[in-house]
Amino acid sequence: FVEQCMGMAQRINSMRSKLREALESLGSTRSWDHITKQIGMFAYSGMSKEEVTALREKHHIYCTLDGRISMAGVTSNNVEYIARAIYDVTEGK
């Protein structure tokens, strides 16, 4: 059980790093270091309610209106898509 929990925590931390790296590599003008400084299954993105609503409507990515993301739902298969969508709604491009 402990090994499974450690494995899950390592995967979530890895996804935090990959999400931050992807946002930075896209050229985001925002600082995303808070994503990797946080711990646990959720991450506060810093997105506004309007940005979260745009994320839902344009990209069908759902998080709480205060921008809290469930990191358990971020995978190696969707992290790039999520990063591009966040970049789109936060940079207005």
Image (cartoon, rainbow, N blue to C red):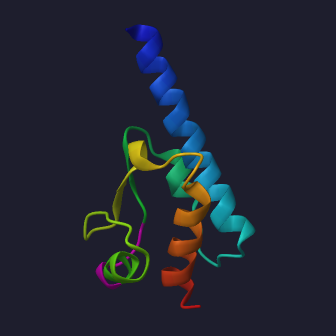
Q: Tell me: 59 left or right of 15.
A: left
Compared with 64, 29 (above or below) is: below
Q: Tell me: 25 left or right of 75.
A: right
Compared with 67, 52 (above or below) is: below
Residue 86: where, in percent of width, then height? Answer: 51, 72
Q: Which residue sits at x=59%, y=72%?
A: 84
Q: Which residue sits at x=46%, y=27%?
A: 8
Q: Is residue 43 magenta?
A: no
Magenta stretch: give its range. Answer: 46-50
Q: Quadrant of the N terminus?
A: top left
Q: Which residue sits at x=64%, y=79%?
A: 29
Q: Tell me: 12 left or right of 66.
A: right
When asked about the image quadrant of residue 51, the answer is bottom left
When asked about the image quadrant of residue 64, the answer is bottom left
Compared with 30, 18 (above or below) is: above
User: Number of callouts in the render?
Assistant: 0
Q: Tell me: 20 left or right of 6.
A: right
Q: What secondary structure predominates along the stretch shown in magenta?
A: loop
Residue 54: where, in percent of width, then height? Answer: 37, 83
Residue 92: where, in percent of width, then height? Answer: 54, 91
Q: Quadrant of the C terminus?
A: bottom right
Point out the residue furthest to the bottom here: 93
Residue 62: where, in percent of width, then height? Answer: 32, 65
When asked about the image quadrant of residue 41, the answer is top left
Q: Which residue sits at x=71%, y=72%?
A: 26
Point out the residue furthest to the left here: 65
Q: Is residue 49 magenta?
A: yes
